[in-house]
Image: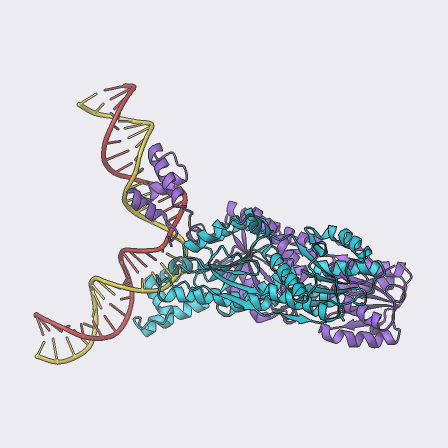
Chain colours: A cyan, B purple, C red, D yellow
Amino acid sequence: MKRKITLKQIAKELDVSISTVSKSLRNSLEIGEETREKVQAFAKFYNYKPNNIALSLKNRKTKSIGIIIPEIVHYFFSTVINGIEQVANEHGYSVVICLSDDSFDKEVLNMEMLANGSIDGFIMSLSKETQYKGDFHHITEVINQGMPVVMFDRVTNDILCDKVIIDDKSAAYEAVQSLIDSGRKKIALVTTVDYVSVGKLRTDGYEKALLDNGIPFNEDLIIKIEDVDTCEITISELLHARAFDAVFAVNELFAVTIIKTASKMGLKVPQDLAVIAFTDGIISKYSTPSITTVSQSGEKMGNKAAKMLIERLEAEHEDDEEENENYTTEVIETHLIKRESTD
Amino acid sequence: MKRKITLKQIAKELDVSISTVSKSLRNSLEIGEETREKVQAFAKFYNYKPNNIALSLKNRKTKSIGIIIPEIVHYFFSTVINGIEQVANEHGYSVVICLSDDSFDKEVLNMEMLANGSIDGFIMSLSKETQYKGDFHHITEVINQGMPVVMFDRVTNDILCDKVIIDDKSAAYEAVQSLIDSGRKKIALVTTVDYVSVGKLRTDGYEKALLDNGIPFNEDLIIKIEDVDTCEITISELLHARAFDAVFAVNELFAVTIIKTASKMGLKVPQDLAVIAFTDGIISKYSTPSITTVSQSGEKMGNKAAKMLIERLEAEHEDDEEENENYTTEVIETHLIKRESTD
DNA sequence: TTGCTTTACGAAAACGTGGTAGTGTTGAAA
DNA sequence: TTTCAACACTACCACGTTTTCGTAAAGCAA
């Protein structure tokens, strides 16, 4: 077991000073060719690589970015991570991932843990609980310390920073409009409790599409679900009453559960019931029938978020104390992927 | 924008030495109560938190563990990460994630990047290409430097280290046996190319189950698929020939594709074709019909892997140079989750 | 020889922390 | 008065780098 070699050890071994070693390795012309070559050969032989931690301390840059998301066993979030990692890697950054488990406390704890020098900036999506509480002090604090933050998907207007979102409202509008276009009149919305920002926006889009088409907005057709497990019961009751002929679900889990429930009751999708889901994930693609979805490219969001963060990080480097905070909000475009669950 | 405050700044502000500040904050009795309180109040007011990087440098511990996996948009791997993160978090560790994209070069690069002090140990699953090449020098090197490595799922015998696996062979055996028990005779195996260690093992289990039941092993019923997209064509040809009445697929993507193909051809699952998949993921649960699977708890694997790594890290701390390398291989148990795709 | 420039290297500070080993002052016991 | 402990605090070192500044030796012209 040979531990990693340091400059100091090389210096001692070759009987030169540490600075000479450092300079030799960086090909400084200050050092004579002979010494330089000797040092480089030695370093190569012992596979010398500078210690990242020491470099971080010196440069006040860790070259890593922190990601805080509610969960990772989740198609959308994992595609976002994928997107972030691609760009980060290209620019020599590592990603450190922390999960909030949709808990406010964990989100705060994780941010504090990473904020003390471990990373150069954050990319995050708010936990449900944080959105519910509306308490963003931990984020403000981090930003005030000069650490850039990019928020994506689940964002808040209460924080000024770069953001990457999709236009949830108009995407929902488009989806509902397409249901209307195919002749559906009684369109249900299956959504989450609305302190989750995206749920609220999607509801708005749904409502607008109805009203624009002269369809009365019926509160009873909005089904709010807190927990997927209770979904099936609620759905089956409404299906029995034949209260609706189309469903717009805010995520694919709801959509597939609805389809399964409908099938069990002998209803045909899409003939008796058309279904559109938000988020184009793996379930929609492989479900039977496959589900028409609003694609929400997590990868693109990740790419964009990483680009924005890194740009800000490198810009900071240039004119150090120049605080030009022209925060932007990037909107990633969505489109409808038509599959078998609609006609 | 107030940058994070350091010991030095506090010391200067209160006109005491840095060590006095440090000791006051750690409640050392060396420091008079008055001074201690003054310092603590000041530190609290400015929200002092020690700098992780400086601590890492000093302690030669980063309190973070590196995860290297082939991909992240993948149910199994994301559950493993989840499992790792849980345990890591409990013990005050962060996780740094790098993706190899199943590329040997990226795997090597990422490992080298993290090995230079950024992390205390690795948890990894080999990339396909690495398994194909059989080149593990990057891992050996890291281990030789005294950095513990825990491998999971896609492991190799060529490296001595802690491992967490499932018994792929006997799990496959069990699955195939259950197909045989329900009266199936012509059982196909849909697998990947076999340089992926787990693919090979599952094939072995499949073969053994057949032979143990006196069913001839037929090479033609082993369908090797490199790319999911080509899967459908191959499958439909064989289905046309009615070559088999049951399928054991090494992952759920293959399974669901097979079911879809069969359904299109008017075959009924499970009556005409029984299907079992390896890996209990989200697709199996929500597919129609839902798919019987061999559960392979990624979360448990992650938990276990993290525990093993952290144990080794903390043990190292104790008796420093004591190299007692009694590596173990932990086998996580699997079980069959019966759903609609089998009878 | 003196004075000046190169060449080739070394010393030391800095990044932020924490532990060990002092140091100087006070007060009390011998 | 001397001695010695307790107290309250400071100095210094190490972790591994990079970088600025310094300087000795050598070379060269006058």
Residue A263, quarter of picture: bottom right
B190 or A114, which lies in front? A114
- Percent across and percent down for residue B311 are 58, 48
> Do we see residue A97 in this rendering?
yes
User: In the picture provided, is B253 more to the left or to the right than C4?
Assistant: right
- Percent across and percent down for residue B272 are 89, 67
User: In the picture provided, is B54 more to the left or to the right than A276?
Assistant: left
Q: Is residue B34 above or below residue A201?
A: above
B116 or B83, which lies in front? B83
Residue D7, quarter of picture: top left
> Do we see residue B285 in this rendering?
no
B216 or B76, which lies in front? B76
Q: Quadrant of the N terminus of chain B?
A: bottom left
Residue lying farthest to the right in this orientation: B183
Q: Is residue B149 above or below residue C4?
A: above
Looking at the rendered structure, the number of numbered marks drawn on it comes to 0
- Percent across and percent down for residue B105 are 56, 71
User: In the picture provided, is B312 more to the left or to the right than B17?
Assistant: right
A188 or A141, which lies in front? A188
Q: Quadrant of the C terminus of chain B?
A: bottom right
- Percent across and percent down for residue B35 are 33, 36
